[in-house]
Every structure is written in structure tokens, then in C-alpha cells.
Image (cartoon, grey):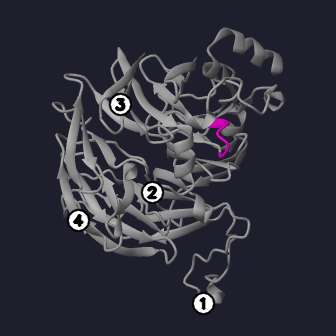
Amino acid sequence: MAASFLLAMTRVPLFLAFGVLHAGAVTDAPPGSSPEWGEASIRSSRVEKPVATALPPKPQWQADPLNLFVVVEAGDHHVSLVDGDRFEVLHRFASRSALHGEPRFTPDGRFVYFGTHDGWVTKYDLWNLTPVAEVRAGLDMRNLALSGDGHWVMAANYVPRTLVLFDANLNLVRSYPVATLDGKTASRVAAVYDATPRHSFIAALKDIPELWEISYDPKAEPIFDGLVHDYKMGEGLAKPGFLGVRRTRLDEPLEDFFFDQSYRHAVGSTHSQGIKPVAAQVVNLDVRRRIAEFPLPGMPHLGSGITFAWRDTVVLAAPNLQDGALAVVDTKTWKVLKTIATPGPGFFIGSHEKSAYAWVDSVLSPSARDSLTIIDKRTLAVVAQVREPGRTLSHIEFTRDGRYALASLAEMDGALIVYDARTFKEFKRLPMSKPVGKYNVGNRIARSEGSSH
């Protein structure tokens, strides 16, 4: 096994080497059947680099490891590591195709976990510039979550309909079939996120009206799924709270969701297919029920929302996948304070706790995808716009200190564009092949610890 692995590593790019040994493990399912990818398939797909445990526990390059940017270049399936002080590429390596969702960083910033649309999860050592382990969690994966302590990885799948839990080294711990309590209705998983202050993962289900909480706290309270009024019926029998499924039943499924700053509430969008206007549900995770609902125009993308202080409250700002409208919501009253017009529908909004401004794209607009709109968080007014005429401009990420804002010129002959976050003037441009996302290690770790900027 080890010899075959090392031979494979000499023939293909870093990430692709992990897939070579099991390339024939997945076959197309017969027409009309559901593809299967069970625990045996998951375990057999896993590969680990033999020398991973002997790698030095410090960066093998000169830069601030917490001001490092991980940039996904979809044009030629590579990842670039960029020094956030000098804005220079430190290293570039081949990745699997179709990297999907946000990469997740361990609390020390050493390791990053990447996921692909077709279910592969890769652990990469940023300090030593090498992959460590890889496993296939499913056949159609939505996203990954990493626990705040860095000990657990959770994968959310469309196919099969499972949540899959791994330890930090990508050894399978448990696969959860996602279905109603009686097992009659299965569901795809819309998204899973870590709620570090709660020591748990929260998952939204696309096809059944439930929100799941899976605690990784060994002291988690036991779970009672029944009504607990008739012990003869078994309704009062407790299930372990540690790594167990705690269900919050809803009136409608959530498409995506976002935590408020307390992590007591999950705010998710509900799409009612024309029956009524799109609404946002506010679910209290402690009492496990919806406590508020408010209408939002178009198709709000709450999963990429941000929160920030405004006057005497904290507001949530979220872009819109259908309309040129940024919704600003008071998280005390759950009322829409303002709708800010943008040139077109967008996917991403970005800010930083040390910046007075939020940047939102219009990447879903055929005519305005070349613009970024800049909003003053103090006045909730549009103050500026930057453009790359006729091109695609998206996804803002800030340096660790908030001094610079980096945008993706998401074209094959694209670039990472560095803007001065105070003057909005271009500072530097690094040529790249369709950069679709960039992630600052320090900022992402801070966000996982409870910051929502």
C-alpha cells in the first residue's frame, strides 16, 4: 500500500495523487436507483501520507501564518497561498477539480480542509506545504464544517442523504442517515456549520422541516425525542447527547442559515414557491422552536450574511440572489430596517470589525457583475463603487488587520485585486486563473470563534 502510494505521488499533482488508488471504486448507479456510498466505501477511500506525523510543527516559509490567504483558482484547478503583508504568492499547488464551499482552518492555522462537489475531503498542511490525508465522504457534497477545537470534521451531502463525521485525521467516526424520526422521509442536507460557543454542529435539511444540532461536547445533555408523557410507550427514553441528533422541528425547511452573534439563534431563509413572499425564520436553538419570521424581498442569501454594531443594536446584512437589494435587519426586533439598492443580485458581502465599510458584489447580474458596491456601516448608505468593466468581480476578503480588501477578478485571465480599504483605490494586482474565493487564515479562525463580520 505504501509503495503504491509513493509511486502515485510521483506521477500526479499533490491532491490528485490521493485519488489514484481508488479511482475505480465508484460506479454509476443503474437507472432509477439511488447511488450508494456507505461506511465501507468511505473507509476504503481514505489515504494518509506516511510521513505526516514527522513534519516540523512550524511554518517552512517566512510570513505571518495568520495573515496568509488561501486562494482557490478554478480556472486551472490550483490553490495559491498569498502573503497578506507583501501580497506575494508563497506557493501554488494543484488541487482537485470542483473545490466547493469554504475551506476550514484548524485553530492554530496549520491545517486546512478542502471539500469538492463530488465528495472528496482533503487535509492539507499549510506550514509544510503538503497534503496529509484524504477521504471521500459522499458523491454530491454541499459543504464542510470543522469543530471549534479542531477535533471533528462534518460533511453535508446531497447524495447519499447523509451527514458524515470524521476525526481530525479524516478517520470515519459515524455516518448519519438524514431522515425523519420514523425513517419514512429522507432529506438532502442544505448546509452544516460549526457553532463553536455551543460546541456543536448545526445542519439545515432541504427536504424536511427540521434543524439538527449534533453536539461534540462530552458533557452534552441527553436527548429526548418523544413527548415524554408516557414512559410505557418508550417516549421518555433518553439518547446520548454527545454526537447525538437533537431535532428542532419547523413549519418549513431552511434553504440556508446564519447565526446571530450570540449563537442562540439561527436565521434562515424559506422559499415558499410563490405561496407567499420569501420569509426568514428565526429559530431559537435553546428552546428549539421558531420565535420570529419576517418577509424579505426576492431570494435572500442569509448564508453569506454579516452582522455588525449599528447605533444601539446589532444588524444583519444579507445579499439577494434574485434582486439588487441588500436587506438590513435589526437582530433585537427582527424587523427589516432598510433595503439598500445595489446594481444587481449578488452572492457575497464582506467586511471587517476594524473597517467602517461593507462590500457587496452583483455577481449574479448579467449587466452588473463587474461591480462591487461599498456601503458605510455607520449610515447604511452607498458611498462608492469599484468596477472592472465587462468582467466578473466578486468575493471580498480583508487582511487580518482590515487595512486592505481583496477581490476576485473571476476570469480565466483574472487576478487577485488588492484595494486600500479606506480609499477604495487599487493597491496591487496579482494575475491568477479565475480566482473564485480567497480566505484569510486569521480572519476565518476568528469568525469560527464567534465573530460574524
Residue 230 image label: 1
Marks 1 & 3, CB-CB < 8 Å contact: no
First reached walking from the N terminus: tag 4 or tag 3: 4
Task: Using the image, tell me which numbered label, if any, was put on residue 340.
Answer: none
Name the N-terminal-most of marks 1 and 3.
1
Give SS at disc 3.
strand
Q: From the viewer's perspective, is 33 left or right of 39?
A: left
As measured in the structure, the alpha-carbon distance from the residue carrying label 2 to the one carrying label 1 is 29 Å
Question: Residue at 77% of width from left, 15% of height from top?
Answer: 6
- Tag shown at residue 337: 4
Where is the N terminus found, in terms of image quarters?
A: top right
Q: How many angstroms separate mark 4 from mark 3 (CA)? A: 29 Å
Q: Which residue is mark 2?
A: 205
Q: Position of residue 188 (x, y in %)?
A: 46, 50
Question: Around disc 2, counting alpha carbons within 10 Å, would you say few (fewer than 14), some (14 to 19), or many (20 or more)?
Answer: many
Q: Nearer the viewer, mark 4 or mark 3?
A: 3
Q: Quadrant of residue 395?
A: top left
Which callout, 3 or 2, points to the residue nearer the camera? 3
Mark carried by residue 419: 3
Residue located at (56% from left, 38% from top): 441
Q: Residue furthest top?
A: 11
Q: Nearer the viewer, residue 139 or 57?
A: 57
> What distance separates the C-alpha of mark 1 from that of mark 4?
46 Å
Secondary structure of the residue carrying numbered label 2 = strand
Mark before the other along the chain sequence, 4 or 2: 2
